[in-house]
């Protein structure tokens, strides 16, 4: 068991919670680089086709680039695809970064559980991410990333792997995700959940659940 077992473990989703999601920006950017039928693949919470295979770890970034280049009939670069994918991150909030640091200072173990891909993570784990020279690893103790784990929310297996990684009981975990379906899957395993709106200010609810100011 974790040495911080008396403290609630707080596990955040990325898109919609740490930053506001806007699928329309990603769609526009994919079309800019030549992916004209991108609506067939993109979703708010779980991608389809080779986009889903990328986030499920079934395709590497290079395999995905090659296959998408073949589909659109022209070579696409890694930089173009990172530009397109990061369109999802419509708005980042300093309040959220401050809150993550506050929770860590209060002694709460903080983790991320995200359906994501190498293109998003290349940006999110870089010093360009927060505008202050820090990537995700500065704010989180652990990152549970779908493409690395080769499983995706809302499958029970990814939550079970996260519980094992946190080394505590499910009831000692607070999971925050803007997808009701993902929260329902987590709650079915005994995890406590919070389901804020996309881009909503979750700080008061989180602090209240954890008993802090």
Image: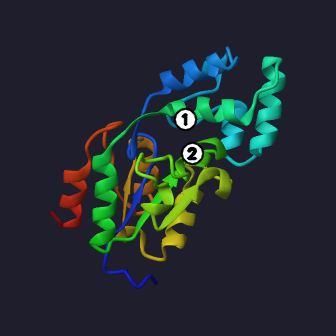
User: Dividing the picture into quarters, in which one does residue 123 lie?
Assistant: top right
Q: Residue furthest front?
A: 133
Which residue has dot 1 on it?
Answer: 86
Residue depicted at x 42% and y 68%: 170
Between 103 and 5, which is closer to the camera in this rendering?
A: 103
Could you tell me which quadrant the C terminus lies in? bottom left
- Give the SS element for disc 1: helix
* Marked residue nearer the N-terminal end (1 or 2): 1
State left or right for residue 146 relative to residue 204.
right
- Give the SS element for disc 2: helix
Find out whether the residues at labels 1 and 2 contact each other: C-beta distance under 8 Å.
Answer: yes
Between 101 and 54, which is closer to the camera in this rendering?
A: 101
Between 65 and 175, which is closer to the camera in this rendering?
A: 65
Badge count: 2
Residue depicted at x 71% and y 49%: 57
Which residue has dot 2 on it?
Answer: 123
Give the Cα separation between the discs numbered 1 and 2: 8 Å
Image location (x, y in percent) of residue 205 = 21, 52
Is residue 122 positioned above or below 161 on the image? above
Is residue 167 positioned above or below 188 on the image? below
Image location (x, y in percent) of residue 97 = 34, 53
């Amino acid at each position: 068991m974790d040495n911080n077992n008396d403290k609630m473990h707080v596990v955040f989703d990325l898109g919609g919670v740490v930053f506001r999601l806007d699928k329309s920006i990603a769609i526009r950017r994919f079309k800019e680089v030549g992916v004209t039928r991108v609506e067939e693949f993109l979703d708010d919470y779980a991608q389809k086709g080779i986009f889903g295979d990328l986030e499920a770890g079934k395709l590497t970034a290079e395999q995905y680039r090659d296959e998408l280049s073949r589909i659109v009939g022209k070579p696409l670069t890694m930089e173009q695809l990172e530009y397109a994918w990061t369109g999802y991150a419509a708005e980042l909030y300093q309040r959220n970064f401050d809150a993550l640091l506050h929770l860590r200072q209060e002694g709460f173990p903080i983790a991320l559980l995200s359906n994501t891909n190498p293109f998003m993570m290349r940006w999110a784990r870089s010093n360009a991410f927060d505008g202050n020279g820090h990537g995700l690893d500065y704010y989180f103790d652990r990152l549970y990333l779908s493409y690395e784990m080769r499983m995706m929310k809302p499958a029970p297996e990814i939550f079970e792997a996260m519980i094992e990684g946190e080394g505590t009981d499910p009831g000692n975990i607070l999971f925050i995700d803007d997808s009701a379906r993902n929260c329902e899957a987590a709650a079915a395993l005994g995890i406590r959940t919070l389901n804020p709106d996309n881009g909503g200010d979750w700080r008061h609810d989180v602090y209240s659940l954890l008993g802090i100011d």
